[in-house]
Image (cartoon, rainbow, N blue to C red):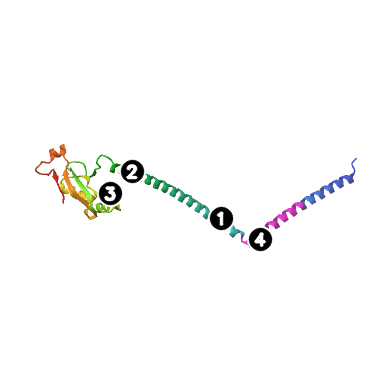
Amino acid sequence: MFDISLIGGFFWLLKFLFFVFGTVVGLSILVATVGHLWAAGIEQRAGIEELREKVAVYARMATGLAGRLDSRKDSASSAAAALFSIQRQETALKRKVRELETARFRFVRVLGKEQMPNKPYEFMVMNTSVAHQVKRGEKHPFYDNSWASSQPVQVWGPSLEDAKAELERAYPVTVGFKITHVELVPSKTNAMSVPANQEPQMAVAS
């Protein structure tokens, strides 16, 4: 037979354990609540929420600035690539011009539309300012030294007067260009379309 006193002691022990467990849990909840309220009070007194908002604003500003900086870097990289391409093209064009100026064949500049009823006139043109600069051993700031002597310019126009006007628009007298000679370029088309008594085959411009 079981001893009743033992059973009563067992129940008393269980009650004590439940009391201790409840007390510990209650104290833990109380301590946690008090700690949370204490921390919230400290944060409020110290302005933590305002500081957090400022940090968030600064973070958004930093993100925006970083994005704009990346965009500017991309734009600058594209502009640098375009500039480099233009510089390469300019170098290639300058080299081609030098090759043409020193070539054995004659370099002829062409103006006007090469179509009927226009006729080709060949003008010999020089620049007196360039010629003076070359004589003094200097280089003209705008034009090549080749203009010191007469250079051929082929102009297409319906008449000699129109061709001369077209030439003077491209090579104005006001900057030193001067026509030294002009002639109608002979061709089968000219022979059929221009009678000899209407258009001179050669003329000297003043």
Name the image quarter holding residue 109.
Answer: top left
The x and y percentages for residue 44 are 63, 61
Nearer-the-camera pick, 64 or 135: 135
The x and y percentages for residue 177 are 22, 52
Name the residue: 22% across, 49% down. 126
What secondary structure characterizes most of the magenta part? helix
The residue carrying mark 1 is: 56
Sequence-wise, the earlier of marks 2 and 3 is 2
The residue carrying mark 3 is: 145
- Please identify, in this view, whether the residue under mark 2 or under mark 1 is nearer the observer: 2
Q: Which residues are magenta?
A: 24-47
The residue carrying mark 2 is: 95
> Contact, CB < 8 Å: mark 3 with mark 1?
no
Query: Which class describes the residues within 10 Å of circle 4: few (<14), some (14-19), or many (20+)?
Result: few
> Contact, CB < 8 Å: mark 3 with mark 4?
no
In the displayed structure, does residue 26 sit left or right of residue 158? right
Nearer-the-camera pick, 191 or 64: 191
Mark 4: which amino acid? Ile
Q: Residue furthest front?
A: 136
Give the alpha-carbon distance from disc 3 to disc 4, as whole Å.
85 Å
